[in-house]
Amino acid sequence: MLTVEGLRSRYGRIEVLHGIDLHVDSGEIVTVVGANGAGKTTLLRCLSGVQPVAGGSITFRGEALTPVPAHRRLSRGLAQSPEGRQIFTNLTVEENLRLGAFLYSDGRVEKDMEDAFGMFPVLKQKRNLAAGGLSGGQQQMLAIARALMGRPSCLLLDEPSMGLAPILVQQIFDVVKGLKALDVTVLLVEQNAFGALKIADRGYVMETGRITMEGTSEALIADPRIREAYLGI
Amino acid sequence: MPELMQFLLSGVTVGAVYALVALGFTIIYNASDVVNFAQGEFVMLGGMVTVFAHHAGLPLPLAALIAILSTAGIGVALNKLAIEPARGAPVVSLIIITIGASIFIRGVTQLVFDKQLHRFPAFSGDEPIRVLGATILPQSLWVIAGAVAVFVGLWLFFTRTLIGRAVLATSNNRLAARLVGINTGWVMTLSFALSAGIGALAGVLVTPITLVSYDVGIALALKGFAAAMLGGMGNPKGALVGGILLGLLEALTAGYVSSQYKDAAAFVVILAVLFAMPQGLFGKKSTDRV
């Protein structure tokens, strides 16, 4: 579904992605784990088009994605729940969700919103409140729900567990795992390697702008190098 | 008592014009954080283009429509030619660009048209209407109705339409707006067109009362900016209330003190309000949870 080959990107003159190769197949949950600063967020920003690509290719459902501007990529089926949640703080929860479906104005929008409220009941209670007043966990739920309102076939998730209490982290990961049943393919970027690998089918390990290891989640969890460097076991 | 009534009526009329200019500031500020000091030139263009189109033989409503549409086009050109190429520059640079653009527009206007004062006939005659012992021109009612209609229209646009909310979303978080599929470049274009069109409408409405020449824009931009700051920059309700308050302050000072002091008195009050409430009357500090 999504194929990345030799992807390079730089901030100014400093290259931060030195040729990334990865692929995500339809229906998979794939995770990219790595330390802070490894380039995981930059990778997702390149995929959603808000970060310029300096080389390499991105192919999504058979189409070269690099020439497609960011605001057109959702219509291709690629949604992102960005780092730091990036919700519309001045707008209400419901308006945030409605804008997630900005591309659509059919009857399904209403139904999708009910589904989102079913997934995160707390958002329904707060639907008319300004999103900026939500707790961190609730904002994360809103960011994921808003991305799903765009009817993606593939969801890019950037650090959904960041800054959340462990019980909320588990809840978020459970939701991500449940996306499989909704036919949404997931590319999950996480520092919380153990939590991410537990729900993923496959994983990539990223270090300073390069993929250094890849494999099934079981194999990565079992790998002594991973256990030492990322799992703290 | 009739005296007071007279001052209030003329204050509200002038205030409605300031409110329209302030609403124009609000739209562009919301979409881009830029304070567009060419806003006054849009008002001037609305008046000037109507004058010359009318002189060329077009009926007044058509001339006014052409003025509003062509000014909206100039607003779009300002965005495309001057603001968009400087994307990524600090907001202060963008504001200075708008000051340059306003000088440019003024210069071109005096070359294309002339330096004379102009007017065209009032829409509903010049026969004053008596209200509680004071009088008001029918054109003043047009100005006030125009400001109210634009305010209500904008309120409906921002709260009831998806595109309006897309504009608010863009101003709140540009990155997220792009990720949900909003073309933020197009939102900027729309904001400049809307803002310029509203400015031109103000010019069309007020020209029969105040006359127009190539250089009326600067003073209007300053007053409109002051009104927007008084009400709280970025808040349409603040723009409306700020504009009317500023107009009333000026009219009352001119009436009871001296017309020489009307600008000074207005600005002293604004300074006092901003000392106590730096966000303006309706402005609120945005809060972000991290």
Image (spheres, grey):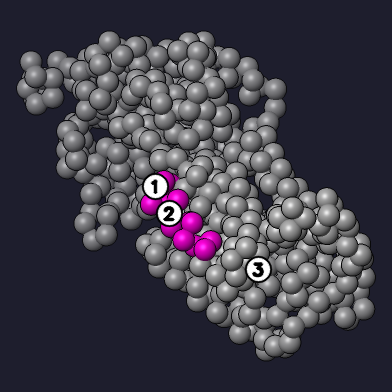
**Which chain letter goes with mark 2?**
B
Instruction: Give me the disc on residue B272.
Output: 2
Q: Earlier in the sequence, mark 2 or mark 3?
A: 3
- Left/right of residue A14 with respect to residue B256 in the rendered view: left
Residue at (65, 76) in percent of width and height: B216
Residue at (64, 32) in percent of width and height: A104
**Which chain letter goes with mark 1?**
B
At mark 2, the secondary structure is helix
- Mark 2 or 3: in front is 2
Category of crowding for the residue at label 3, using alpha-carbon neighbours closer than 10 angstroms: few (below 14), some (14–19), many (at least 20): many
Residue B198 seen anywhere in this rendered image of the structure: no
**Which quarter of the rendering shows the C terminus of chain B?**
top left
Q: Name the amino acid, label 3.
A: Phe
State the residue in front, A167 or B167.
B167
Answer whether residue B276 is magenta in the image: yes
Across and down, in percent, residue B34 comes to 48, 59
Residue under pointer 3 = B42
Q: Which residues are magenta?
A: B265-279
Residue under pointer 1 = B276
